[in-house]
Amino acid sequence: MMKKFGGLMKLNMLLIGMAVILLLAACGGDETGSAAESEEEEVSDSASDSTESEEIQELESVKIVLNWFANAGHGGIYAADDQGYFAEKNLDVTIEPGGPQVSSIQMVSSGSAEFGLAHGDQIVIARNQGIELVALAAINQRSPQAFMFHKGHGIDDFDEINGRKAFIQPGIAYWEYFKSKYDLSDVNEVAFTGDHTNFIQDVDSVNQVYLTGEPFFMEQQGVETEVKLISDSGYDPYQYVLYVTKDYLEENEETVRNFVTAFSEGWEYFKETPTGTLELIHEHNPDQSMESLNYANETFEEFIYGGDAAEHGVGYMTEERWSTLINQLDEAGVMEVEVEATDIFTTEYLPEK
């Protein structure tokens, strides 16, 4: 009886031992499976976090100061912002309008803005004054600046302005050039304020204008006019020039390249699809009607997309043009220091066409 009982005890102990082994094996399998699943979850979570990090990557904030109030001549910049071309280059761009009381050169040189727009002669004169700016792209291949006359009172040559009242912005560079090239000693020079009332009342007067603006407004008021382009004299600086300081360019080449690339894409988009961007500009500058914006855009087209831009793309510039401008300003007595064209412009960041 004792032997039988002992046998049963051994059998029971054996069965219990086997059960424990099976239970541990099962637990071990569960542990292995849990670790694998946990590792997969960690990898998945890590990938998700990485994707979310890329999506919410902070954009680099930069500012561009325009040379004047928002208008059709700034279309490519507004298009680049509105179409997301700047954002695609990791840039959050603030577009600040200019105006009679705003100097983009002062703001950019002081560090209040990274990018600016100015006329080519303004950039040369700034360099003469010790402000080292570098031109990156020229929106206008030719200058749309002009003199406006009442119809029938125009001129064939610029020295015929003598004996007339001329409304001219004080210190404007091309007027200094004109006074050195032509005999304008008998001109009654009056500071231009932007108000055309006095011009309208004096049929023999002369008014400085942009071909893209004032002639249209005169027509709307029933005043018939004629214009003569400043460039007919041979003085033809690039207009609406995108620039930065030399120091900023040297320290932020990638940012500059990204900005110029998006800037160029904006102009190509604006050329083909201007309407939506013009409506956006009208929202920013409601003083400009859609009719006037469309007129300006049509007038600007040959200045922006013609000339060297037809072959090389919007923004293109040459050393010859910059050298000619420097020499003209030197002849006008504006320059006090020697300036090399290669020091004040570069086409390195413009995309190849």
Image: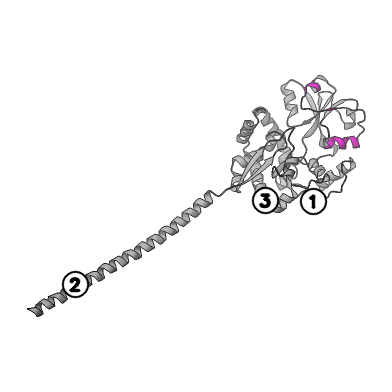
Mark 3: few/some/many CA within 10 Å (<14, 14-19, 20+): some
Eye-nearest disc, 2 or 1: 2
Q: Which of the 4 quarters of the picture holds residue 169? A: top right
Q: Determine whether 140 is above or below 27 in the image.
A: above
Taking depth in this image into account, of 62 and 179 the one nearest to the observer is 62
Total of numbered circles in the picture?
3
Which residue is disc 3 drawn over?
A: 257
Q: Which residue lies most toward the bottom here?
A: 3
Which residue is disc 2 drawn over?
A: 15
184 magenta-colored: yes
Taking depth in this image into account, of 328 and 122 the one nearest to the observer is 122
Q: Determine whether 305 is above or below 47 in the image.
A: above
Q: Which residue lies most toward the front here?
A: 2
Mark 2: few/some/many CA within 10 Å (<14, 14-19, 20+): few
Is 46 on the left or on the right of 77, as rendered?
Answer: left
Determine whether label 3 and label 2 are within 8 Å by CB.
no
Q: Residue at x 65, y 31 (%)?
A: 285
Between the residue at mark 2 and the residue at mark 1, the CA separation in whole angstroms equals: 94 Å
Could you say whether the residue bearing mark 1 is in a helix, strand or loop? helix
Eye-nearest disc, 3 or 2: 2
Residue 252: % across, % down = 68, 52
Could you say whether the residue bearing mark 2 is in a helix, strand or loop? helix
Which color mode does the image show? one colour
Residue 77: % across, % down = 66, 40
Q: Residue at x 87, y 47 (%)?
A: 337
- Could you tell me the amino acid type at mark 1? Asp
Quadrant assignment for the N terminus:
bottom left
Between the residue at mark 1 and the residue at mark 3, the CA separation in whole angstroms equals: 18 Å
Residue 246: % across, % down = 75, 50
Which residue is disc 1 drawn over?
A: 343
**Region rendered in magenta:** 173-198
